[in-house]
Image (cartoon, rainbow, N blue to C red):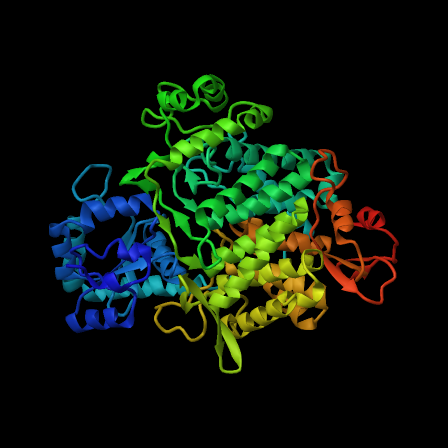
Amino acid sequence: MPNRLVNESSLYLRQHQDNPVDWWPWCPEAFAEARAQDKPVLVSVGYSSCHWCHVMAHESFEQEYCASLMNQHFICIKVDREERPEVDKLMMDAVQMVHGQGGWPLNCFCLPDGRPFFGGTYFPPEDRGHGQVPWPQLLMRVADFYHRNKPELAANAEAIAQNLTHLTRAPDADGSSPSPEDLISAARRICEQHDDTYGGFGSAPKFPSPSTLSFLLAIRATEAAEANRLLATRLDAVITMTLGAMARGGLYDQIGGGFHRYCVDRDWTVPHFEKMLYDNAQLLGLYAEAWARYRNPLYARICEEILTWLERDMRLPNGLFAASLDADTGHHEGTTYLWKSADIAESLGPEALPFAQAYGITDQGNFEGSNIPKLRGHFNERERLAEARAKLLQVRQQRPQPARDDKALLSWNALLVNHLTKTAWIFGRREWFDLAAEIEKSLWDHFAKKSGDGFSLLAVAHGSVASQAANLSDYAWLAEAELNLAAYAAWGAPPSTSPYPDRAEIILRKAIDDFGDPHAVGFFLVTNQRTDLSVRQKDWFDNAVPAGNSSLLHGFSALLARTGEPLWAHEFNQLTKAFGGTCRNVPNGVAHALDGLTRAATGLVTIKAPSRTDWNTLQQALNGDPLTIAHERPFRACTLLPTAESQGFQVCIGPVCQPIVASAKEVSAIV
């Protein structure tokens, strides 16, 4: 008999509807039941495309014995971390405080009032060594301790809550804003963590780190980097080596396009096979900007293939994009993506040998006796094998496919709009700008909700039905997307039809009102109306996605450059003071903030131009012909402002405006 999750919209929650566990969704009634029965609460967090979440569900949550222990001793709550990132953050931070590490599945034990006191990630159903406590044994220990030592658990929970509250303060903040020298030093420190053998940062597992690479690209464009050949060479090496390793390795789906979430090894061979919208959105913009600087044709092809994959496999009927593809197919990880050498031979015939040589296909394989294709050959070989890859994709599409999570998230779709808009401008692809504009319209159609005289945003849509209050990241990322659309609207659409600047301003004013802290620097993750969390937290550090406070820096600086309004200068200057210490101590943790500070410090570019301007000519003057490898200047973001009275072009860099010039070529020489 299905449990309470049968009525939930979340795919992840519905995956657990037939568990014998008496699951609750996240709701006040669950905690009320815990208080009434005097039971601790188990909050179990995961997401639909997570391989190890499926493993623990199959081994424990689907088993009658484990379920009976959970039902007898706990009130059990199942949470989709993508739909409730604020709950995930609270539980994850608590578990990391206890163990020093976290991950998914995440299992956190709480008091009936919601305060976490203990937790962990994956637990096996029986003793397998490696120091992991079996799940049934852990359940009994926690339940017994709860009833025998409530005062001690309450003290532990209070200590965790106080520490989490303390972490709402900007870490290492000393009241200073990062200086240009601090930003350069931060880039150097990040480069010291680079794996000069295989690319990426640190050892295994390896994540894409788009915010970090974007910051390094921003530093590379500064005068300080241009003037320091040693620094410039180091930045070029780190950026291009990592981008090349990711694009050529198993992290990238060489057959179907799009990036997997991360690789488990140091040399980018074996991915965790789930594909996330947020990764591919950010990597799209990163590879586009890297192409603009380095003109590596592989980067351009990656951008095209990400978009092809997104439109082919991830587009939803409501005009938005799905959240993710599962890591598993039929309860086995990655089987859709794996190839035996015999499969290649049967599918490609005479082309099999050159393909195998170019992509490292062997009889032994590189993953459990099968092959994950990795590009070993030259880009020209890759191009010659395009038809072979297309044949293999057709073969692969006849196999069972990983499940798709069809929920549409405001935040992740906003990331896509932001980076797709930049990519469209860099490559001069108006159809990509039009797609970004279509997604933005769908976001407002689905997620904007009138409330009194104002509005609020919802966060999750299943089909045409949206729900759940948006958090700071939703507002901040949508504001960034609106401002990027506004920047290039004159090129992409008639200016009179552009709602983007006004929408960005409305969003950020709402963020200030609902998420601001009147007592300290920074913005809370959830609104001041939320009462269901034991701690109201602030999000300072980037993870796979940028932190909300980091993104606000981009929004405030862009609106300041566009309007000159003192409000945005005040908000930007106040928020920069949160990052002085982290810039110096943990720069890799706040890379998106440092990216925004670097671009603001070098001066955001505004180009005032006559309304009759041929915007395509200006685009080509600034970005070069996509078919031309050589180009004398890297990409620099700008805002196009049509001005009816203008008789020429005027370039403003930050608050300083240059004399009017007559041609797009002269504009290119200034920017």
Q: Position of residue 378 (x, y in %)?
A: 58, 24
**Which x, y percent locates residue 31?**
25, 70
Please indicate, yes or no, whether residue 528 appears anywhere in the rendered image: yes
What residue is drawn where x is 73% and y is 55%?
603
- 93 or 7: nearer the eye? 7
Percent of width and height locating residue 160: 34, 61
Residue 354 in the image: x percent, y percent?
49, 18
Using the rendered view, name the quadrant where residue 265 is placed.
top left
> Is residue 441 left or right of 125 when viewed as pictured?
right
**Residue that sits furthest to the bottom in the current view:** 452
Q: In percent of the image, x 75 and y 45: which residue is there?
A: 620
Instruction: Kindly indicate the quadrant of the structure image that contains residue 115.
Output: bottom left
In front of the other: 632 or 653: 632
Q: Is residue 289 left or right of residue 198?
A: right
- Would you say residue 594 is visible in this rendering? no
Residue 294 lies left or right of residue 410; in this view the side is: right
Residue 78 left/right relative to 671: left
Residue name at image x 40 percent, y 23 percent: 344
Which residue is at a point 56% across and 38% down the rendered structure image?
302
Whether 312 is drawn above or below 511: the answer is: above
Nearer the observer, 44 or 192: 44
Quarter of the N terminus within the rendering: bottom left
Numbered label tally: 0
Q: Relative to residue 292, is residue 643 depicted above or below? A: below
